Image: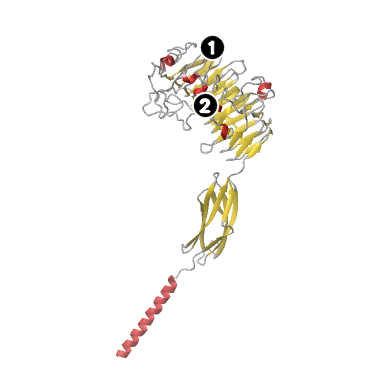
Amino acid sequence: MRTAKSLFTALFLAAAFTFSACEKEDDTLPTAPQITSELATLPLKQDETHTFTVSISAAGKIKEVTATATAGTVSLTEITGIGQNTGSAKVNYKAPATVGSSTISVVVTDQQNQQKKIDISVNVSEVPPVVVNAGDVEGTWEANRTYIVRGNLNVPAGKSLTVKEGVTVIVEGDGTQGGSPEITVRGNFFSYGTAEKPVLFTVPEARRTKENMFVGLWGGILGTAQSQEMVFQHTRLEYVGAPAAENSPIVTSGEVDAGDPRYGIYFTNPNGKFVMQYSTIAYSKDDGMRINQGNFLITNNTYIYNGATGGDALNIKSGSIGDAAFNVFYQAATNGIKCSNSDDRTPQTDVNMYNNTAINCGWRQTKAGRGGSINLEKGGRGKVFNTMVVNCRYGIRFPKAPDNPDVANATTGYNFYFGNHADIAAEFYPSTGSISKGLFETEHDIAGAANANNPQFASLNIANFDHNTAKTAANLEMPAANLTFKLQAASPALNKGKTNFSPRLATINAGGKTYTAPQPATYIGAYGN
């Protein structure tokens, strides 16, 4: 009996051992997957693309393959071997616009959810600048590239030049008549910056100084009567206004004399279309920009230090119809906007100017009685509403006869005035103009004594402004790089704007895109809180 029990126990233990061994054998996972790449490092230029292959093996069969990158963009194509033991994939990578190092990681997962990762090191170096010598230009200046301009450029009639986001254009000008290139546009010009990657037209870095703010080192971007469309989005132009050469189209057309300063931007086609939004013109010797003729939309821009001893930030002449709204004019020599029907071209100038801000303007104008914020004059028609005028030489001005605007078709009101000195407050309604409190819709203006009605900018100090110091260009310092014009929540300019009117032009179509004019805001000025 004992022998039988011993035999039974032995058989039971043997069976248990066999079952346990089988169970362990069943729980054993296959070998982890493997992945290899045809390259371990990837040297690229900015925005360059490259495709390479990874090979995969998995005893437990391939379930999926994924890829990520710490910078740039990566995708996988031509993936083979899903559900099989071997496979491959194409890794498609585009380098970022910034110089530096990054990593591409490719991960394979088998059907037991085991994973294997391989890292490929990426080193991105700078793309060398493109040198553009004098001559005709068209086509596209590629995103995030640097272009060095070393002579006068011409966009031919019927052709287009498109400047993509992130482009920097360095114009090698010296401020002389013959050594300061311009870009003449007989065709179309499109500058498509973005908020994250604006376009910059500038001069060599060593020349970006306080001393050169009003010198005028290059000639600007100048349209001709042939130019059909010009668009600027998130674009900055600076150090413009060099003297014009005798053979410059802006001279041969009779707009300026040889040796006179050129404008930062110039457009002159009664049938043309001009759009400028979210852009900046800084440090011009004379007018920041001039629109002589055409349909236009000029909104959400910033104009900084335009004009040495004269010149307007935005000068609009006869033959022009459109909207100028939500712009900031900071320390222009004369006006933020001058709108005129001078030269009596057809159609009559007709502009809606609303929700603009003019700060410290008019003081460098050497001629008496001129300049300050917005001038509507010489037969021009239009509306001037919701303007914030801060420490300017003059308030909104409709000159007296014979330089008066088309008064029957002009109006203004709902404007906000602040001056930190009695001399400034005395000219909220200019003594050289025809507007007095109560005319048109000015009963809705906010205007008081010196230092009354501080608009309460969130970060801009306006209390310490000295209008006598501001009369001399040499006294000006380089403005802060982070200038902001938003208002505090308690600003008296909030909820005081006029909104029951429409833009002059609802939309403009240019470059195959539609641009919509913004509606007037409930606040006064270019920014709310």
Q: Position of residue 420 (x, y in %)?
A: 41, 19
Q: Quadrant of residue 220?
A: top right
Q: Which label sits in the foreground, 2 or 1?
A: 2
Q: Is residue 71 above or below residue 162?
A: below
Q: On screen, 330 above or below 115? A: above
Q: Residues within 10 Å of mark 1 (few under 14, many from 20)?
A: some
Q: Which residue is mark 1?
A: 404
Number of numbered discs on residues: 2
Residue 229 x, y percent position in the rendering:
62, 29
State the SS at label 2: strand
- The residue under label 1 is which amino acid type? Asn
**Residue drawn at the location 60% of the way across and 33% of the way down:** 190
Q: Is residue 215 visible?
A: yes
> Closest to the observer: 57 or 201?
201
Q: Residue 389 falls in which quadrant of the image? A: top left
Residue at the disc numbered 2? 303
Q: Is residue 24 above or below residue 434?
A: below
Q: Quadrant of the C terminus?
A: top left
Q: Amino acid at mark 2?
A: Tyr
What x and y, as percent, mark residue 514?
Answer: 56, 32
* Residue displayed at 59% across by 23% down: 291
Toward the viewer: 478 or 385?
A: 478
